[in-house]
Image (tube, grey):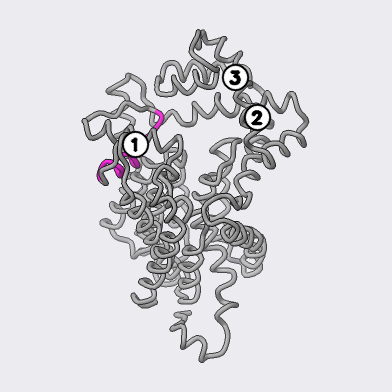
């Protein structure tokens, strides 16, 4: 596919995000969330040479620090930079689709589908880490599909490390990608030495990624005496999993699922009142506000976090299937369409509904075509990205899988959409190397 069409994909993506995010550019406080304030504070700490958090990782705060944001001042240039990053992600995904299938119609459709992806567009218009993570992930996936080289392996490992330091909840994603791209059957490089080299390059990329993560763990050990990468999983366990299991014990499964999927705000308020006994058992929160406030106040203290997690684990022993069930309910909540009161209004909601409606059909089409390698990669990626974060499903969790969902939709429907008359194919500049 020509460079001109990549530029068109980038331009369409950026214009749509600029139009969608214009209200946030005018009123920057609309782009702020609770997490945004924490990221901005950490960016200011980084400019002073410190990073006090063990819950957050430095990827997104570094990005904010480089773009000049601070706890007391923000700039619309940060949002524009995120829109540019997200538009670049669409170009990388189109190039990735071209490398996977060597079909221009799939590559073009991938880029256009990403341009009209409501979740990705919405994330790029807020002070959130998803746009940076998605750009780094798309770059790593694209590098994994290039002709195997040691320079590419180094770049791929660095991109994976930077992506995980941006979103620590996706710690195992790079290993999944390296494994699937190592076992992929490449129609261009089929000789035995090429297969061996592909395995070696992916192993090298994984090793560089591991060294990046080990470096951050070593830094945390040097400053605290605790060898931790991030406390996200531990904090989520006693802040989300433990109270949700208590809610299941008090409600029926149907009532619990209905509450979280249809009325998540009420469910979250109920959840916050179910952690009092845990706080009291650990001797915390004397005169310090609600139990939920106490838990968030100590989330950067490794010793206290480990004590709370141990106490929660002792109370949830033997409840594996209950935990699995509440995480499955979280996946259902994550896969809800964007509500019309979000950015983009009813149009974004309808587009998101249409994408979600087409996904099962697209999976069926790819099964019919026997594209098993790609389906296996997508399914494992989606399960890890959606099931692990926790029972309180959020649209930002779905942003982690929107790239592979976009590839699924494009691979399933692009050949049918563009397999029209030869004149139409020439007008779009579409060709296939297969």
Q: Residues within 10 Å of mark 2 (few under 14, many from 20)?
A: few
Marks 2 and 3 sit apart, C-alpha to C-alpha, by 19 Å
- Relative placement, left or right, of 176 versus 248 is left
- The tag on residue 192 is none
Residue position for label 1? 40
Q: Residues within 10 Å of mark 1 (few under 14, many from 20)?
A: many
Marked residue nearer the N-terminal end (1 or 2) = 1
Residue at 63% in and 21% down? 274
Residue at 51% in and 8% down? 283
Q: Please state the horizontal and vertical placement of residue 62, each as a whole percent of the image.
A: 29, 41
Q: Quadrant of the N terminus?
A: bottom left
Q: Is residue 116 visible?
A: yes
In the image, residue 414 sits, relative to residue 115, either above or below, namely below
Marks 1 and 2 sit apart, C-alpha to C-alpha, by 37 Å
In the image, residue 72 sits, relative to residue 311, either above or below, namely below
Marked residue nearer the N-terminal end (1 or 3) = 1
Which quadrant would residue 69 be assigned to in this image?
A: top left
- Relative placement, left or right, of 109 versus 229 is right
Let me know if residue 64 is in the magenta part: yes
Name the front one of labels 2 and 3: 3
Q: Please state the horizontal and vertical placement of residue 158, each as a whole percent of the image.
A: 30, 48
């Amino acid at each position: 596919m020509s460079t001109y069409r990549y530029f068109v994909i980038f331009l369409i993506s950026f214009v749509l995000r600029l139009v969608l995010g214009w209200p946030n550019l005018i009123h920057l406080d609309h782009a702020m969330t609770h997490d945004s304030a924490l990221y901005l504070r950490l960016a200011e700490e980084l400019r002073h040479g410190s990073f006090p958090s063990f819950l957050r990782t430095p990827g997104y705060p570094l990005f904010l620090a480089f773009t000049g944001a601070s706890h007391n001042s923000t700039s619309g240039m940060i949002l524009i930079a995120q829109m540019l990053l997200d538009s670049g992600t669409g170009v990388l995904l189109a190039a990735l689709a071209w490398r996977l299938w060597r079909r221009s119609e799939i590559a073009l459709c991938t880029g256009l589908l990403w341009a009209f992806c409501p979740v990705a567009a919405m994330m790029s218009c807020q002070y959130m880490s998803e746009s940076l993570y998605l750009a780094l992930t798309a770059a790593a996936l694209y590098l994994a599909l290039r002709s195997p080289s040691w320079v590419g392996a180094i770049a791929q490992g660095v991109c994976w490390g930077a992506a995980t330091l941006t979103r620590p909840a996706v710690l195992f994603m790079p290993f999944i990608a390296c494994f699937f791209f190592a076992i992929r059957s490449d129609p261009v490089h089929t000789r035995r030495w090429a297969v061996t080299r592909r395995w070696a390059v992916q192993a090298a990329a994984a090793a560089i990624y591991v060294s990046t993560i080990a470096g951050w763990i070593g830094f945390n050990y040097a400053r605290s005496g605790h060898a931790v990468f991030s406390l996200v999983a531990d904090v989520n366990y006693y802040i989300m999993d433990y109270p949700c299991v208590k809610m299941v014990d008090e409600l029926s499964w149907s009532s619990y699922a209905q509450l979280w999927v249809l009325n998540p705000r009420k469910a979250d308020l109920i959840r916050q009142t179910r952690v009092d006994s845990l706080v009291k058992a650990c001797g915390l929160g004397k005169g310090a506000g609600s139990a939920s406030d106490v838990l968030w106040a100590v989330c950067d203290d490794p010793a206290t976090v480990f004590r709370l997690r141990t106490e929660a684990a002792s109370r949830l022993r033997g409840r594996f299937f209950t935990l699995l069930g509440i995480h499955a309910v979280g996946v259902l909540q994550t896969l809800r369409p964007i509500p019309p009161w979000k950015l983009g209004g009813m149009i974004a909601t309808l587009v998101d509904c249409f994408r979600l409606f087409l996904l099962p059909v697209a999976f069926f089409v790819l099964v019919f075509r026997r594209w098993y390698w790609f389906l296996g990669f997508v399914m494992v990626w989606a399960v890890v990205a959606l099931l692990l974060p926790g029972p309180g499903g959020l649209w930002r969790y779905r942003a982690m899988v929107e790239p592979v969902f976009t590839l699924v939709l494009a691979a399933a429907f692009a050949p049918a959409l563009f397999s029209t008359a030869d004149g139409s194919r020439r007008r779009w500049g579409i060709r296939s190397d297969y």
